[in-house]
Image: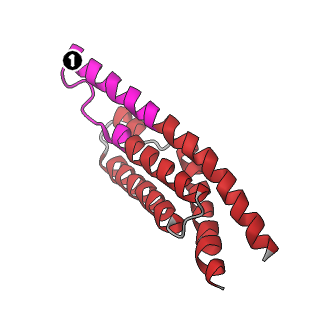
Amino acid sequence: MKTVLILEWLLRAFGAFWVVAGIYTLRTAWASRLMENAGNKIEPGLFKDSLRTNFLFAVGFLTFCSGTSLVMASIWSPVIVGALVLTQVIYFYIQSRRRATASNPEEIEDTEISPRTRNAFVFSVVIWVFSALVFGVWRTV
């Protein structure tokens, strides 16, 4: 029981970090959207693809919500973190499909997934598993 309590408080502390990370990601997405809009006003069609910006908004919002639920030790934490993981899986799938149909090196480069995004995904899966155990399975025992 003591281990569960320690894990719960570790998840709460990590949740506080994720609240800040979610806010930062939302600010980054907002700045990216501003740049896209400004670029398209200067040269229409310059930024045709806003997938990354939309992904940043979705992930930023879900990271913020996940962090908040972890801080509150909510039983809904596994569901919200699971939604974050699912969003990332969908993004990886879309990028892999776009890479398969890319016709030039520039399009292939646009479909690259950064190591930071991959690491965030792995870390999200780990947090998802621990939150499911701590706030789901072990809480009911």
- Residue 50 belongs to the span the image colors magenta: yes
Residue at 31 percent across and 43 percent down: it is: 102
Residue that badge 1 annotates: 41
Name the amino acid, label 1. Answer: Lys
Q: Residues within 10 Å of mark 1 (few under 14, many from 20)?
A: few
- Outermost residue on the front side: it is 72
Residue at 73% over, 65% down: 7
Q: Is residue 4 left or right of residue 130?
A: right
Q: Quadrant of residue 57?
A: top left
37 vs 42: above or below: below
Q: Residue 9 at what x, y percent from top left? A: 72, 60
Spot occupied by residue 32 in the image (x, y as percentages of width and height): 38, 28
Q: Which residues are magenta?
A: 26-54
Of residue 47 and residue 12, the one placed in the foreground of this image is 12
Q: How many marks?
A: 1
Looking at the image, which residue is at 44% across and 37% down? 26
Label 1 secondary element: helix
Of 62 and 54, nearer the camera is 62
**Coordinates of residue 41 in the picture (x, y in percent):** 21, 17
Task: Where is residue 59? Give x, y as percent.
Answer: 44, 48
> Horizontal placement of 123 versus 38: left or right?
right
**Quadrant (top left, top right, bottom left, bottom right) of the C terminus:** bottom right
Q: Quadrant of the N terminus?
A: bottom right
Secondary structure mostly taken by the magenta-highlighted segment of the chain: helix
Q: Residue at x 64, y 78 (%)?
A: 139
